[in-house]
Amino acid sequence: MKSPAERQTVPSAEDATLNLPRRKALLALGALGALGVAVAGQARGAGMGGMAGMPGMGGMAGMDMGQSQPTAAAPGVGVFSRALLIPPELHGQPRDGVLHYALRMAPGRSMLVDGLQTATWGYNGAVLGPTLRVPRGKAVQIDLNNALDQSTTLHWHGAHVPGEMDGGPQSLIAPGGQRRVHFTLQQPAGSLWYHPHPDTRTGPHVYAGLGGLFLVDDPADQHLGLPQQYGVDDIPLILQDRRLAADGRLLYMTRMMDRMGMKGDRFLVNGREQPYWNAPAQWVRLRLLNAANARVFNLAFADGRVFHVVATDAGLLPRPVPVHTLLLAPSERAEILVDLRGDQGKRLVLRSDSGVVVPDLSSMPMDADAFDHQGFDLLEFRVGPPAGTPARLPTRMVDLPVLRADAPVRRFTLQGMSGNMMGGAMGGMEGMGSMRSGSQAMDASEVGPGGMSLGVGGQKLFSINHHHMDMARIDQRLRLGSTEIWEVANQGHMAHPFHYHSTSFQILSRNGSPPPAHEAGWKDTVLVRRGETVRLIAHFGQPAGDAHPFMFHCHILEHEDNGMMGQFTVT
């Protein structure tokens, strides 16, 4: 049996017969890797401070080409030494018929990994944020306070709100600044989330720790018998990965290949590495969020048991769907029910069985790391006695409306790293200027918590419809109240999770075939595999003008930050 490393380095028969575009891309990536080695060698020879004098390098001193910075040794199997943290709930304070909430973005220190203190950012705490609960049809007001040392935004991912309230890149909150948003959600019960969305810096801001769940409550959900006791049998699970230095500092985009999507070797659930949960022996509901920057999870239980998908990104399914595995791309959510009634006294492990599917999502072997080839543990269930009111698995849940388009089909093509990427890579090396030598002054806005690099953003590396993100350009204009089919074709070498703001969609087809049953619900993010075309239908009922347009983009955050995003108005 080959090790993960061996599986990554031994070429397959397919690799030996690469088509021309793939060969060009591989050569470009190989050249980029060679460039990293050459730059690292010159830096060592000249001293890191001398890198500022290298052509096009700007302030690259401190950039780790994959060799120089010692990282905290990652465990090979589950840790399960600390209890799962459950984010506190915010229900809002009623006043004058409005529910009032407050979120403060601020730095803190967290023990992501047992024994290591890490500087992080969080909402109302050191890392991540509280779970906001918002009733359907209720007016809410949320006061945002930015106590960070740089501008950011707060986006309500999956929420049907106007462009002015959406929290896109145009809605920056300056350091020390405040912003007030208000809206009334008229959408089904669902597990949404909130996170930063500044242009070119969404990746590092999320990686620094900013993010949280945003649950829409609907009375219809409460009559189905589903688990409803938050923190007891209704549990949020925010899944992420991080890379840490030996001193606990977050390492972000410190290697050249991190441009393809930032992946770590420490696996966090609700901000703790591989924790355990004292679960009750009954039906439990897990609200799953892939909040990783780039990693895809293929969720399964180590004992191979069946579990039931009851909801997609933004709402319940018509009926529960039994599965053994569930693939979640960045920003996708799902709610699952797990039957623990006969498991009291047992220990179960939720893990990612990545090797059976993730490496095939890209034609480039270097896009998949050892964990993608092998898999990894996430959470241990320690099943104890039942607690509270028992729930059940319903046979039917909701009826989904049939949407009918009243506008022409709108087409989108996704492009990855192209054959001329070396020009963009070389020209963008100066974008790594957030890593400077100790002798140079460093503005606070150039680094994240604890001196974490902000990596590289704003480069023209990935595109949609052959256009790179431009804040001054509106890419699409929609009619308010229209129902449209969007056709998304992936022309790149790897899978991309495609997301758009303001609404939820239904997947009509994947390469002409109906979607699997567990995807036949309300979604706002869809993983589009290489060579695949998906058709999506949505109603656009929220307005957005030129000053605050909505966004469509890849939700691999390093792709979004480096060109793979566009803007649309709804008027």
Image: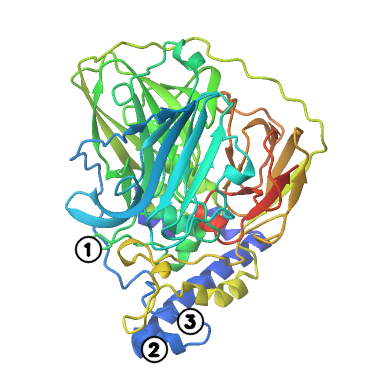
| Residue sitting nearer the eye, 143 or 377 | 143
Which SS class for mark 2?
helix
Is 376 left or right of 322, judged from the image as shown? left
Disc 1 from disc 2: Cα separation = 26 Å
Q: What residue lies at 50% left-to-right and 20% top-to-bottom?
A: 218
**Could you tell me if residue 209 is visible in this image?**
no
Q: Amino acid at mark 3?
A: Gly
Where's residue 459, x and y in %? 58, 67
Few, some or many residues within 10 Å of mark 3 (<14, 14–19, 20+): some
Q: Which badge, 3 or 2, comes first in the chain's sequence?
A: 2
Is 498 left or right of 243, judged from the image as shown? right
User: Residue 409 appears in which quarter of the rendering?
Assistant: top right
In the picture, the quarter occupied by the C terminus is: top right
Q: Which mark is residue 50?
A: 2
Disc 3 from disc 2: Cα separation = 10 Å
| Residue sitting nearer the eye, 523 or 546 | 546
Q: Is residue 464 above or below residue 484?
A: below
**Are the residues tagged 1 and 2 within 8 Å (C-beta)?**
no
Few, some or many residues within 10 Å of mark 1 (<14, 14–19, 20+): few
Few, some or many residues within 10 Å of mark 2 (<14, 14–19, 20+): some
Q: Amino acid at mark 1?
A: Asp
Which residue matches tag 3? Answer: 58
Q: What residue lies at 43% left-to-right and 44% top-to-bottom?
A: 291
Q: Is residue 53 above or below residue 101?
A: below
Q: Amino acid at mark 2?
A: Gly
Q: Is residue 412 above or below residue 337?
A: below
Is 491 left or right of 458, judged from the image as shown? right
